Image (spheres, rainbow, N blue to C red):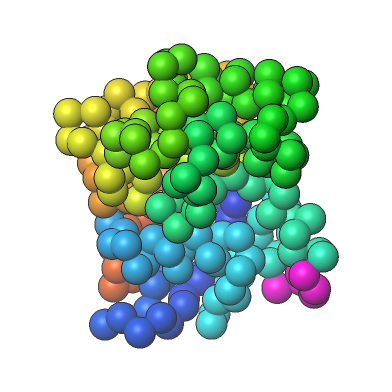
Amino acid sequence: MTSALVEFAGVSKSYGGLRPLRIADLRVAAGEQVAILGFDQATAEVFVSLATGATLPDAGEVRLLGRATSTITDSADWLAAIDRLGIVSDRTVLLEQFTVIQNLVIPFTLQIEPPPDADLARAEDLAREVGLADAPWTAPLTALDPAAAARVRVGRAIALDPAVLLLEHATAQVPRELVSIFGADIRRIADRRGLALVAATADEAFATAVASRVLTLEPSTGKLRSRGRSWFRRS
């Protein structure tokens, strides 16, 4: 059996909602794209915090890249682990007064005015990869529409070649008519890079476009029910 990069086993986490967040069994292998429906904004944030080891479950075990997050003992250890993750979330800080390219060059260098030529080229490659046309590259983020800003977040998430891409309500600001295109583009990026992808969402159109395996969370039990193709593994 292929080793999982993200695993949840018997996980429960209280966070102030009506019931704890429960995930009974989740395994995501290298190169696999999985979307989980049934998350509101609060539970998606808790899920991502658990997956990254930023918080620990009250019960059960979360394993990231083959390692239990409970064994991460200090900040340096944690930072080394999350270096292999990319996170797409509205909580990711973007510098709105800076341009698209300046925001995309930040993972590589803090010298942004002007950036070194090699880092500038990498940022421009990222902009093309995530589907940003040349025109807005020099515009401040405040001039972008929400769909373009969401693509900047994807670029930031993949900049350092992560093994796992986590998406937390990634379409919250994306216009409905662009959701499926956005999801399909992210899936192509994940396929091309061989990334494992986990999307916590309430957006069925996005889930279908971004993932090869779509699951629905049963909040009361934490079971993940498969949707779509009959060969999907059932939890």
Residue at 29 percent of width and 34 percent of height: 145
In screen coordinates, is 173 left or right of 21?
Answer: left
In screen coordinates, is 2 left or right of 57?
Answer: right
Residue at 48 percent of width and 24 percent of height: 137
In front of the other: 104 or 180: 104
Residue 124 lies, in percent from the top left, at 59, 20
Q: Residue furthest front?
A: 113
Residue 35 visible:
no
Membership of 4 in magenta stretch: no
Membership of 74 in magenta stretch: yes
In screen coordinates, is 32 left or right of 172?
Answer: right
Residue 89 lies, in percent from the top left, at 44, 51
Whether 219 is drawn above or below 103: the answer is below
Whether 125 is drawn above or below 53: the answer is above
In screen coordinates, is 89 left or right of 201?
Answer: right
Residue 28 lies, in percent from the top left, at 55, 45
Q: Residue 162 sits in which quadrant?
A: top right
Q: In which quadrant will I find the N terminus?
A: top right
In front of the other: 101 or 7: 101
Whether 55 is drawn above or below 143: the answer is below
Residue at 51 percent of width and 48 percent of height: 95
Q: What stretch is highlighted in magenta?
A: 70-75
